Amino acid sequence: MKIGFYNDHRPCIVKENGVVDISREVRSLEGGTPQVTLENIISNWQFLRPRLERLAERGRVIPMSQVRLRAPVPRPGKVLCGRGNFMEGVPVHPMRPLATFFKSPDAVIGPGDTIVLPTFRPNIFHHEAELAVVIGKPAHNVPEAQALDYVFGYTTSVDVSARAPVEGEPPLAGEYGKSFDTFLPLGPAITTADEIRNPNDLGVKYSVNGQLRQNYRTSDMEHSVGYVIAALSAVMTLKPGDLILCGTNHQGLGPLQDGDVGEIEIENVGRSSNPVVDSMKRKWEWAVDPTMGGRIRERRASLDGTPSTGTWPLTPPSPAPIRRD
């Protein structure tokens, strides 16, 4: 089943041809915000599920042409992101420790919403297509073998990233360049965990204006979804509605710029797109940026002395935007 929100954040079941409103079924669970409503739905899922399954089969479908889908996780309490969590053709032995960072929950937008590039001047704005995990029940010190039992479902996410300020721009600490407003598109819905047999065997694609860029499988993750949940739960209690982004394979990254439309698709999870607007009308070469993927492979290879087998150039990134012809 796919759970989401539409129009004025009314809860719904999302189907291929439209949505089925579930407001009546969850009326007693509605909170002061859409996020609270979602968390209440998640916490009461075992009781709601049979009714919603019947409704999904028999309920009136409102056509997609009449609805506007909203972010399926409107304002998560926590957004935790994997950093450098893919092998990218260069396995490292022993495995590196898991690295993560926080991303602002206020960066969330939904399907069709606009990614707005800020006036901050980075070296480049990149897309990072990622599988996102929605936590289903409080998780604290959970064993890796049981960690997937704490998942409510999965959705698509794009970790939009501003890379390194250009000369004259104030530096951003840590990963703040990933937390600008609108830098976390989600959607179109949460696909419940029972529909995903193995979250570490899903195809992830990202296209810009129809050009396929990222194309990888989650089987390339260095630390599995279960491991990530277990490791994070050893540090903090994960709560229903919290979001974990699993990280990305950096091969195929490219720029996002004014006028682009980016589309993410994750196998069995969903597909969603977002237009991009930039008031400064900056331009980069409209193509896959080979430098980031090459640098990641080179860095991984240096950890255990394994020669990089990638074909990506290992040159440093261009220090400033370049015009496209």
Image (cartoon, rainbow, N blue to C red):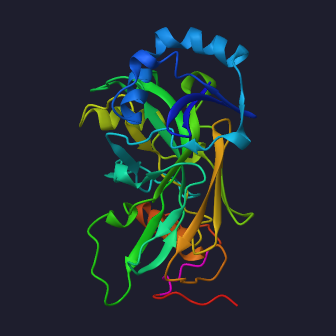
Q: Is residue 88 left or right of residue 286?
A: left
Residue 203 visible in the snapshot: no
Q: Main secondary structure of the magenta part?
A: loop
Name the residue at 60% across, 53% down. Answer: 112
Q: Is residue 137 left or right of residue 182?
A: left
x%, y% of residue 220?
A: 57, 47
The magenta stretch spans which residues? Answer: 312-318
Q: Is residue 126 left or right of residue 150?
A: right
* Residue sitting nearer the eye, 211 or 253: 211
Q: What is the quadrant of residue 155 in the picture?
A: top right
Question: Any magenta on residue 316?
Answer: yes
Total numbered circles: 0
* Residue sitting nearer the eye, 304 or 117: 117
Name the residue at 43% across, 60% down. Answer: 304
* Residue sitting nearer the eye, 268 or 200: 268
Q: Is residue 165 above or below residue 269?
A: below
Name the residue at 32% across, 39% down. Answer: 77
Residue 325 visible in the snapshot: yes
* Residue sitting nearer the eye, 5 or 262: 5
Question: Any magenta on residue 2?
Answer: no
Q: Is residue 317 above or below residue 306?
A: below
* Quarter that holds the N terminus: top right
Q: What is the quadrant of residue 38 in the picture?
A: top left
* Quarter that holds the C terminus: bottom right
x%, y% of residue 203?
A: 66, 45
